[in-house]
Image (tube, coloured by chain):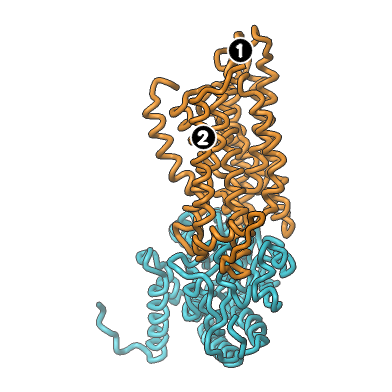
Chain colours: A cyan, B orange
Amino acid sequence: MHTPRTRRPRTRAMLTAALTTVALIASACSGTADDDAAPADQTTAAAGEPQAIVSLAPTTTEMLYAVGAGEQVVAVDERSDYPEEAPVTELSGYTPNLEAILGYAPDLVVLSDDSGDIVDGLERSGVEVLQLPAAQTLDDTYAQLEQVGAATGHIGEAAELVSRMRGEIDDIVASVPERETPLSYFHELDDTYYTVTDATYIGEVYSLLGLTSIATGDDTYPQLSEELILEADPDVVFLADGQCCGVTPETVAQRPGWDGLTAVREDRVHMVDEDLSSRWGPRVVDFMREVAAIVGQIPVNQPAP
Amino acid sequence: MTRPSPRHALVLGGATLLLAVAVLLGTLIGPAGLTPGGVVLELVDRLPLVDVDSGFTARQQVILWEIRIPRVVLGAIVGAMLAIAGATYQGVFRNPLADPYLLGVSSGAGLGATLAIVVGGAMGSAMVPPAAFAGGMIAVLATYTLGRSVGGGRSEVVIILAGVAVAAFASAVQTFFMQRHDDTLRQVYSWMLGRVSTSGWTDVRTVLPYVIVSVAVMALFRRTLDVMAVGDAEAATLGIAPARVRLVLISVATLGTAAVVSVSGLIGFVGIVIPHAVRMLIGPGHRLLLPVSLLTGAAFLILADVVARTATSPAELPIGVVTAAIGAPFFLIVLRRSRGHI
């Protein structure tokens, strides 16, 4: 479209190239549903670093702090509970209130979902918006961290963080024993047996660690029949509903018929951190470490049940 | 007393046959690959003095006896209760549109369940059934009190309107709490769409006493409902106290409904569609309407649950989605065909 300006200083040109790449990744990641939305592109314009950032989702809050933009954050939504120093407010990310957000005089708002057309309202009020939809893959997470770094003036730190994460994840993956057939797992999202397939973010994480979900099909967050769970007889059960629903390995063993499951008999029902396993931010590494420790304890030469 | 006519026997026999077919299908069909032949052999094996080998593994036996069959039984109980309660409400209010939803029972139970999930924290799940039960009872009490205090002479219409108001209020409060605690949304949502059992025989044992008491009382009053259908004054001349009968029947119907709703979540349309369909086929007499609604409601919910657990296998559809998808269009057809009779 534009003729390249050749006289521009070299560093500036490289920065622009980097930002353009990030923006391209961003728009590629933002999904097919709303290609025209991609408001992330504009935030990368180097108009000075934002000094008053509001974050409306736990994952985006964690990302901001992880890339070193924590000091610029003036307010985060009620559900952001990490890191501890984050200035938690009553702001809701689920039903965001434009006036309440503007009350913090932000120059950048980072959010995940555009609930109630909040992005439009913010942009009309002249506030930069960085929308980071739920990551579908680890690569999305890396790209989003780089976007956050670019939008907040921490490009170098973001790049460093991403390469450190990649390294750590490689190490964790390498630490897991290789198996001829992957272990099957049931990741319990709540006590009505909603779960994940391999085609989800968390499914990808489990896959990297040599696990495969008992759930399949087009619906990536299906509610499974109990019959099916018992028939599939998963090798491992991960409970991500300890906090919400009070489910523990003991209550699982008491469910009718569940005491016959391999995972129950072999003590392979494990509680996992609900937050770590449902956010797509920098702490995914911690979650992988947690799962790798569990998987590492399961003997490789398991006779087929 | 009236003697049982051949027609009665025929209708009751037909409805029983329908239920038997539903039970059989519900037992044979499921997402786990249990062979129908094996299931039949398993059932035969349980008969006294018979010993056959179904070839099922221990796990397959567990799936059949601890998961699928309790689910069929609970489905039957819930469907039967919702249908007979619907028929009774409609008789009591002389209004074919009366059902647990319109009287606020379901919304009250929904609010109770939501509060348990939102406020209860880790204990929330265990508190859902009693909280739903309490919520349903309080809501219908509020409906009845409001209806009586504002109602005056036309109390049966006013009570339904009061029910709509109570239901709307309960829903609003529920929405308020759900928005304040959006992390529990899926849990509340999943309860609201209904499901039949994830706890084997426990739920069956929990609801059965309430349902038996409730159904027994409704059965006792089936002739009284026929008399009241003519009018309160006529009923009074026959020595019936309409206000008292109404209170008793509303109480037991609500008790039973609240009990089943507390374990199965909100399952709509059974209470309104089944009695309507039955009335179209056999007429409005309650002596036949109540038992046939009971049997047909049980069969309907078992079949709806078969669809729920197989249509999108391995995923499961919420049963409320199935009953609404079948019930709503069916309801419109019924309304169209019965124009002028309502």
In the rendered image, residue B307, in percent from the top left (x then y), is placed at 47, 53
> Residue A27 sits in which quadrant?
bottom left
In the rendered image, residue B331, in percent from the top left (x then y), is placed at 43, 35
| Count of number-bearing discs | 2
Which residue lies at the image location 51% right of the left edge and 56% below the top edge? B28
Q: Is residue B312 left or right of residue A188?
A: left
Q: Can residue B258 be seen from the camera position used here?
A: yes
- Residue contact between numbered discs 2 and 1, judged by CB atoms under 8 Å: no
Which amino acid, by three-letter code, is at mark 1? Asp
Which residue lies at the image location 51% right of the left edge and 83% below the top edge? A155
Give the SS element for disc 2: helix
Q: CA distance from mark 2 to mark 1?
A: 33 Å
Q: Nearer the viewer, residue B230 or A71?
A: B230
The numbered dot on residue B232 is 1
The numbered dot on residue B210 is none
Q: Nearer the viewer, residue A207 or A127?
A: A207
Which residue lies at the image location 68% right of the left edge and 62% below the top edge? A256
In the rendered image, residue B230, in percent from the top left (x then y), is placed at 55, 13
Q: Which residue is mark 2?
A: B13
B86 w.r.t. A253: above or below: above
Tell if the residue under mark 2 belongs to the same chain as the one under mark 1.
yes
Which residue lies at the image location 66% right of the left edge and 72% below the top edge? A273
- Give the foreground label among 2 and 1: 2
Chain under callout 2:
B
Give the SS element for disc 1: helix
